[in-house]
Image (spheres, rainbow, N blue to C red):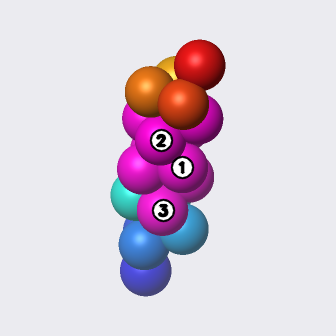
Amino acid sequence: MMKHVIILEILLVISFQAY
């Protein structure tokens, strides 16, 4: 149900690593 939150967190981590 709260999978969207997990995906958002993963995207945030990837964006932070890309920086």
Q: Measuring from the top left, give residue 18's x and y in whole percent.
A: 54, 31
Depth check, front residue: 18 or 13: 18
Pair 3/2: label in front? 2
- Res. 13 image quadrant: top left
Q: Mark 3 and 2 residues: CB-CB less than 8 Å, in contact?
A: no
- Report the residue at 54% width, 68% height from top: 4
**Three-letter residue code for mark 3:** Ile
Report helix, strand or loop for mark 1. helix
Task: Please state which of the two labelled residues, at mark 3 or mark 1, is closer to the viewer.
Answer: 1
The span from disc 3 to disc 1 (Cα, nearest Å) is: 6 Å
* Residue positioned 42% across, 50% down in the render: 10
Q: Quick check: marks 3 and 1 in contact, CB under 8 Å?
A: yes
Is 10 inside the magenta-drawn segment?
yes
Picture coordinates of residue 17, whole percent (x, y): 44, 27
Query: What predominant SS class does the magenta segment belong to?
Result: helix
SS at mark 2 in the image: helix
What residue is disc 3 on? 7
**Vertical side of 18 occupied by 1: above or below:** below
- In the image, is residue 13 part of the stretch drawn in magenta? yes
Indicate which disc residue 11 carries.
1
Label 3 environment density (alpha carbons within 10 Å; few <14, some 14–19, many ≥20):
few
**Residue 17 as seen in the image, left or right of residue 4:** left
Q: Residue furthest bottom?
A: 1
- Tell me residue 3's x, y (percent): 42, 72
* Residue that numbered label 2 is attached to: 14
Above or below: residue 2 compared with residue 19? below
Q: Which residues are magenta?
A: 7-15
Q: Quadrant of the C terminus?
A: top right
